[in-house]
Amino acid sequence: MTAMISRSSLFSRRTFRQGAISAIGSVKIKLLLSCCIVFVVIAFASRAASFMGWKQSHTAHLGHPSLPRKGYALLINTWKRNDLLKQSISHYASCPGLTSIHIVWSEPDPPSVSLIKYLNHVIESNSRDGQQIELKFDINREDSLNNRFKEIKNLKTDALFSIDDDVIFPCSSVELAFSIWQSAPDTMVGFVPRMHWVDRSKGNSDQFTYGGWWSVWWMGTYSMVLSKAAFFHQKYLSLYTYQMPASIREYVTTNRNCEDIAMSFLVANATGVPPIWVRGHIITRNSTSQP
């Protein structure tokens, strides 16, 4: 267990946006992220024996029995930002490897007929060479960040490209990351690296410090890639929903945070392999929609 955690290392979240967070807000976020990491470490450690047993019993499932199926599905998380959702779907529909789009919908009201009609239109208009791209809304009654990693039945591809609705990457960068993922389909391959390390300042080995992009840049290393822009195998959705300790999912729901840390821990413990960071030009956008 220790070797796996140190090798794949555990993680934190939140993109630092220049000038957007005050000093007090930054401290609160860092405290929350530290709590996330400590909680997930404790949860996995307390279940170490059973979780390791689970890993061994799923060896065949997590191995490389065959090459991954061609193409990838887009898994996009959104919340009352239809303008950003429209821009994202319009853009990614033109990526050549895309075969289906799954929108994680956790709003109290279902998607409107006009929204569905618009998205189907832009997909048909922007897809390359008349490629048929399936559009599905994954409707959830509960508003929880765990919804983004719920199992999706009857997926036709092994690869999932998990993306937030407020970031866009060029199709060329997405296709490059997909090709890299195909060479290592058990790991996470993504665009947004972060890092953490043990905080030994208080002589306690179970406390962690979160490092954002500038820590990655300064130290020249990383320990995770955020699921806000990452490829991973669709089998991890089932493991997240049914095999991961329920206390972690409950923490994510209560605190509305840390689902990316939980998924990173899941992949790390299930495979023992590190994530792969792909450099890419990120476009971050702000919504003009009114909630």
Image (cartoon, grey):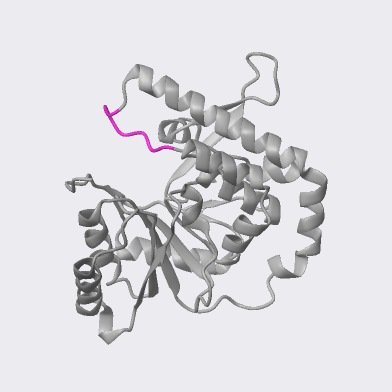
Kindly identify the residue that appears in the image at 53 percent across and 69 percent down. 182
50 relative to 135, above or below: above
Kindly identify the residue that appears in the image at 30 percent across and 66 percent down. 92
Total numbered circles? 0
In this view, the residue farthest toward the top is 202
Residue 56, given in percent of the width and then of the height, sits at 80, 59
Quarter of the image containing the C terminus?
top left
Image quarter for residue 199?
A: top right
Please tell me which residue lies in front, 191 or 54: 54
Is residue 246 on the magenta stretch? Answer: no
103 relative to 219, above or below: below
Image quarter for residue 77?
A: bottom left
In this view, the residue farthest toward the bottom is 130
Is residue 16 on the magenta stretch? Answer: yes
What secondary structure is the stretch in magenta mostly built from? loop
Residue 280, given in percent of the width and then of the height, sits at 36, 53
Kindly identify the residue that appears in the image at 26 percent across and 86 percent down. 130
Residue 286, given in percent of the width and then of the height, sits at 22, 44
Please tell me which residue lies in front, 280 or 248: 248
What is the magenta range? 14-20
Kindly identify the residue that appears in the image at 29 percent across and 63 percent down. 111
Residue 164, given in percent of the width and then of the height, sits at 36, 52
Quarter of the image containing the N terminus?
top right
Please tell me which residue lies in front, 66 or 110: 110
